[in-house]
Amino acid sequence: MSLSIQPSLTQLRLARMQPSNPARALWALLINDRKRVWLATLASVLNKLFDIAPEILIGIAIDVVVRREGSFLGALGITDPYAQLYWLAALTLLIWVGESLFEYLYLLLWRHLAQRVQHDLRMRAFAHATALPFRYFEDAATGNLVAILNDDINQLERFLNGGINALLQVLTTVVAVGCVFFFISPLIAALAYLPIPLILGGAFYFQRRLEPLYARVRELAGALSARLETAISGIATIKSFTSEARETAALNADSLAYQAANGTAIRLSSAFIPLIRMAILSGFLFTFVVGGIKVLSGELNVGLYGVLVFLTQRLLWPLTGLAETVDLYERAIASTRRVMALLAEPVEGEGGNYAPLPAQVVGTVHLQNVGFRYERGETVLSGVDVTIDAGKTIALVGATGSGKSSVLKLLCKFYEPISGVISLDGVDLAQWRTACLRDAVGLVSQDVLLFPGSVRDNIGYGRPEASDAEIEQAAIAAEAHAFISALPQGYATQVGERGQKLSGGQRQRLSLARVLLRDPRVLLLDEATSAVDNETEAAIQRSLKTVCRNRTTLIVAHRLSTIVDADLILLLDQGRIVERGRHAELISANGIYAALWRVQTGVQER
């Protein structure tokens, strides 16, 4: 089932935000499920109200024991002290049941929200990443991108899982306890609340100081992930050069840098806790001493004094959790900023579709005075001008860096030319919708990527709905059916990660079968036989004679023996076509192509 990436209301909200507004982004992520947010908030508030109620009951119990019939409950009509205790016991039971119920509800609701946001944001970020232009992936570190899609979004989930509830419950405690305090004694309330501005001010101070530190932590986490991804994917190279110790040392350096940055942030966030504890102590002492004096002077009964002392604990001690909550919040903000920076990257254009497109692709390709260079790079192609008739086979040859593969990337619309026009069936590629163009153009590259799964899954990757017969027919056309049939489970054989259980030649033939199954009108082969053995090359060459028939084919090749039958050979040098013609014509011209042919075939100069 394909993933829909049509923008939702929340996506549009996020798209309009700049990376400097991560807090707004957090809210936008939650508001998409507004009803559940309100229910979770209500559960958090009610849980905290039930949580602080036992302290009030303890004060009332003290009042009952000391004053008996003259207690608070006695004034309500329950005069028997034993009955008063039974009522308090029943209320305590109900309160504990209510607290447990609402704790279950807020845990369930907030965690569900956190999981939903985590999933939605990861899917949105991944869908956005796959829609980014090809140049983004040539510049970006894969490991860093994986860290954004995995670690950063997980960090955000941790905050949503518990941080929001913690903030709500602290706010509820401050308000609810404050109401009780001011009802009992405005003076004691004012003294008990005196440290709170200092605590909140400290929280904001530390929040500002922590923000750049955690941004650095997330940056180094991405670098560490990139190092790990490179090392694991390149394990064969590492072992072949016996550089395990060197790579371990490099990883150790990156890990120590991450540890040091994290340590700096932890030291600062940890300093917040002692500050809060001292502020809490002052508030508690005010209540303890001033309240005690009022009891001794007869201005306050002992039961209410007990309520104040216990509620002071309930009011102030939870504020110590602010340090951990601020820490979670800053980590989440740093991660959100990185995710938003990814979402702010401009996606690949879909094309104008302003001109009428052909109902059926024929395959005529025309490059008119095409020029191209990579971003921040030198010119790769200059003044390339060629017409490729439908059904013809064209070969591109030349030295490394001459621009051969760049022509194929332009035809796939991975990049746009900086000058000139490339057209397919007379329509400028800029006017083609990208998806429609890539349905008509199939690319087999030198670096083959197979996905974890079976042989059948990989051949059918471009057409998951294809029948087994169609998949087998594509494999036969690619000269892959024989070796697939010899595998332990045939087409059901698992290929392993990146196809590591198969040889290079087998992977290349599966890649060709995968493209052939889509039956593209234009086939692009980028060094498709450069990394295979002679037997595999011969098999691919035999299959190409069949699959290239009545199909426009462009072949990039270093082995000139593989393109001697091409209808037209273009030799590129420093981004320009310097020779063109059929094989025999170019040999007779005795130019660069002829010299390359002599080198490759071993024919001596006379």
Image: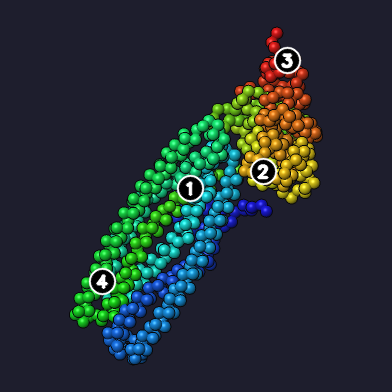
CA distance for labels 2 and 4: 71 Å
Q: Look at mark 4 in the image and give the residue it sits on.
A: 287
With 249 as the anchor, is 389 left or right in this view? right
Figure quadrant of residue 257? top left
Figure quadrant of residue 77? bottom left
Q: Using the image as rendered, state which of residue 317 and residue 394 is in the foreground.
A: 317
Q: Secondary structure at mark 2?
A: loop
Q: Using the image as rendered, state which of residue 522 and residue 84 is in the foreground.
A: 84
The vertical placement of 580 against 305, above or below, is above
User: In the rendered structure, which amino acid carries the disc numbered 4?
Assistant: Thr
Say if mark 2 contacts mark 3, CB within 8 Å: no
**Nearer mark to the viewer, of 4 and 1:** 4
Say if mark 2 contacts mark 4, CB within 8 Å: no
Say which residue appears at 30% left-offset and 86% top-offset. Answer: 71
User: In the rendered structure, which amino acid carries the disc numbered 1?
Assistant: Arg
Q: Using the image as rendered, state which of residue 245 and residue 276 is in the foreground.
A: 245
Q: Look at mark 2 in the image and give the residue it sits on.
A: 495
Q: Look at mark 1 in the image and give the residue it sits on.
A: 338
User: In the rendered structure, which amino acid carries the disc numbered 3?
Assistant: Ala
Q: Secondary structure at mark 1?
A: helix
**Nearer mark to the viewer, of 2 and 3:** 2
Tell me which numbered mark, 2 or 3, is placed earlier along the sequence. Answer: 2
Say which residue appears at 76% left-offset and 44% top-offset. Answer: 471
Say if mark 2 contacts mark 1, CB within 8 Å: no
Q: Secondary structure at mark 3?
A: helix
Q: Using the image as rendered, state which of residue 531 and residue 558 is in the foreground.
A: 531
- Where does the image place residue 583, in percent across and percent down from the top left? 75, 21
Say whether residue 604 is visible.
yes
Tell me which numbered mark, 4 or 1, is placed earlier along the sequence. Answer: 4
Q: Look at mark 3 in the image and give the residue it sits on.
A: 589
Query: How many other residues sit within 10 Å of disc 2, few (<14), some (14-19) or many (≥20)?
Result: many
CA distance for labels 2 and 1: 34 Å
